[in-house]
Amino acid sequence: MTTVRSPAVAGLFYSADARQLEQDVQQLLAKAEFYDSKPKALIVPHAGYVYSGAIAATAYASLHSVASTIKRVVLLGPAHRVAVYGLALPGVDVFDTPLGSVKLDKDLANVIAHLPK
């Protein structure tokens, strides 16, 4: 059985409406400063769009020239509510978003689960 995590902050930090969210993202990307680079990694803020949307869009816009070659995204982020030792990995198969579902690589998560911090 597939387990799905519903969006935790849709409607709070970004729109829960798919059309509005897509429009917001497109506007942010259209205004983003473009750097012709081929990054191997990005460090991107993830606060609400009103706070960090412009700088996040600039980071993601830098992927434009390599977007077609990206096969996997590894997302690392802080645990906001509780202290954890090691990795806090999601116990679901899919993250649901207003723009669609994102399937997680459970096999890779199992490979790295034992890693410290």
Image (spheres, rainbow, N blue to C red):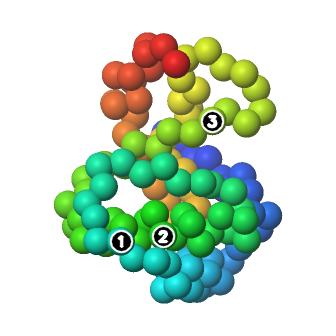
Could you tell whether 88 is left or right of 30 in the image?
right
Tag 2 secondary structure: helix
Crowding around mark 3 (Cα neighbors within 10 Å: few <14, some 14 to 19, many 20+) is: few
Of callouts 2 and 3, the N-terminal one: 2
What residue does disc 2 label?
Answer: 58
Q: Which quadrant of the structure image shows residue 98?
A: bottom right
Query: What percent of the width, then of the height, locates residue 111?
Result: 34, 22
The span from disc 1 to disc 2 (Cα, nearest Å) is: 8 Å
Q: Residue at x 48, y 49 (%)?
A: 43
What residue does disc 1 label?
Answer: 35
Could you tell whether 86 is left or right of 71 in the image?
right
Mark number displayed over residue 78:
3
Tag 3 secondary structure: loop
Q: Residue at x 73, y 71 (%)?
A: 50
Q: Which quadrant of the structure image shows residue 81?
A: top right
Query: What percent of the width, then of the height, locates residue 37?
Result: 28, 64
Check disc 3 and give the amino acid type.
Pro
In front of the other: 87 or 95: 87
**Residue 1 against residue 82 in the figure, above or below:** below
The span from disc 1 to disc 3 (Cα, nearest Å) is: 27 Å
Of callouts 1 and 2, the N-terminal one: 1
In front of the other: 58 or 9: 58
Check disc 2 and give the amino acid type.
Thr
Of discs 1 and 3, which sits in the foreground?
A: 1
